[in-house]
Amino acid sequence: MSAEKSYDELKSELLTKRSGRSRGYRSAAKNLLTYAKRSGDANDDQLAEAYFYMGEYCYTTQEYYDSLGFYMQKALTYADRAANFRIMSRIYNILGNDASLRGLLEIGVQYYSLARSSAERVGDAELLSRVNYNLGFEHYRLDDFRTAIEAYRTSAAYIKKVGFENDDAKYIAALLYCEEGLAYLELGNYKAAARAYTELKAFQGRYDYTFSDGEDIFIFNILALSLVRKYGDADDVERLENAMLSQVMDSATYLDCIPEMLNMLERDYRGGHQEFVENMVAKGLPVVEKYGSPYVLAAVYNDMSKMAKVKKLPERRIYYLERYFEAAEAQAVVKKTTFRVYMQMVNAAEDIKRKNIILEKQAKTDILTGIPNRFALNDYLQNAFEKAQEEQVFFGLEIFDIDNFKQYNDTYGHQTGDNCLAQVGELLSELVGEHMYAARYGGDEFVILYEGMEDSAITDFAERLKQRVSTLKVPSTGGKTITGISISQGIRNSVPTEWNRSWDYLYTADNALYSVKRKKKGEICLMHRSNFAGSTIDDSI
């Protein structure tokens, strides 16, 4: 390293090497860090940046991966000291990417949320567009499609502020249309998905933009094929099927699209397109087995075992289940390594730990109410749902909210609203018994899961909960005690079919809750299926 070079000159060299991942990338990052550590002119901002680029190198190249936590922790320490929220956001975003790559989705959400709050402190629209996109995709992978769509729309709003002067902005915007369309497909809303596709084509025409990366073309084709199957003709279907079969066989780029692809294959299998699905599996599985991470392999083998079960191929199902458990074991090893990095982050700096990354508690417990939060719910919900599906027993899901909650906040202050939520959480902790699970879903919404319970037992509990809530006495900041609190409750209860998904139950319960809100607050509505015409409400109390 030349002693005459300034920090800015060394940084410029690094960015050149970094952009092309060219030879000398690590040396350039190391030179920048050495200068920042030795120079008397270096400040906390430069040290934060230099450590960040070194950590980014470890992440992007997967070389010296065990040092990732060390470099990012050091970067975070200096960024915190300098109140450099922009670099903090980039640190958390990289850590979110890493967690996502290794299948630690809930931890990924936590890191992306921290990245977003840091970016919001400085109003960095470009960073906010990227972080919200990442958050949306993470929620998509958690089958939380509505939250994914909200994050995608937020990302789109920020990217519009940035403008479309460069290809990066165009790329994010175009990809957002695709991902939003795919999320709508998972919600069964083909019209909204088609609208996203139409808007994407209009955007491409307006800005003369086309996808060039294989991964993005693959995502585009997933959306296009699903819509063409419903609205197009046979020639278009055949053309897109051939394009996807060719790409899945010739390239490993589609591996990053595994969640979208598996969802598409499930839709196609249910829709009677078994031959295409089987061809995709036959051509794509060798690539997955060659290049896929343990997390990707586990997801693929799990779906293959389900298809083999439907086709009554017990030997193939056993084979896929064996491969699934092998991949799951390998994933457990990856998780241990990754958690070691997170523990370095958590334990290294007490001040930062206190303010930003107490991840274990955040990942499992809602601080206000003391009950599990949405991320813990996502974990529990999927396992409980799959168990009910396997054992063919009733599975119930209730969403309830506090009536007129906004009015309490507006009239008596947010502290009163928090007191109310805390009391509801305490009540749930007291009442929820065996074969039940309660969590705060967000805002004033709560979710209760009922495992193996018939309608009568669920409605009895729902009535008891409603009655106990009505007896709550909530202190307000003005000394007044709030009484007469009521809740509206939407429930779905049925035995899951082979092709049901956990979000079916969330979606149905949410619509049942909406039905109560629209007709008469403070009531209970129970549904057995996800068709929301008035005649399908099987039981309304």
Image (cartoon, rainbow, N blue to C red):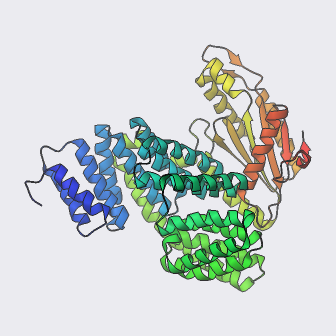
Corner quadrant of residue 240: bottom right
Q: How many numbered badges does the structure rendering display?
A: 0
What residue do we see at 16% from left, 53% from top? 35
What is the x, y in percent for residue 210?
Answer: 49, 61
Q: Which residue lies furthest to the left in this view?
A: 4
Instruction: Give above or below for 40 relative to 66.
Output: above
> Can residue 114 be seen at all in this image of the molecule?
no
Say which of 241 and 522 sits in front: 241
Q: Which of 541 and 348 is in front in this view?
A: 541
77 sits left or right of 141 in the view? left
- Whether residue 341 is visible to the viewer of this picture, yes or no, is yes
Left or right of residue 183, residue 109 in this image: left
Location of residue 305 (image quadrant): bottom right
Location of the N terminus by quadrant is bottom left
The location of residue 426, given as percent across then percent down, is 67, 35
The residue at 80%/64% (across/down) is 497
Q: Which residue is drawn at 77% across and 33% down?
A: 487
Describe residue 413's horizontal placement relative to residue 41 as left or right. right
Question: Quadrant location of residue 224?
Answer: bottom right
For the point 23% across and 46% down, the residue is: 46
Horizontal relation, residue 32 to residue 88: left or right: left
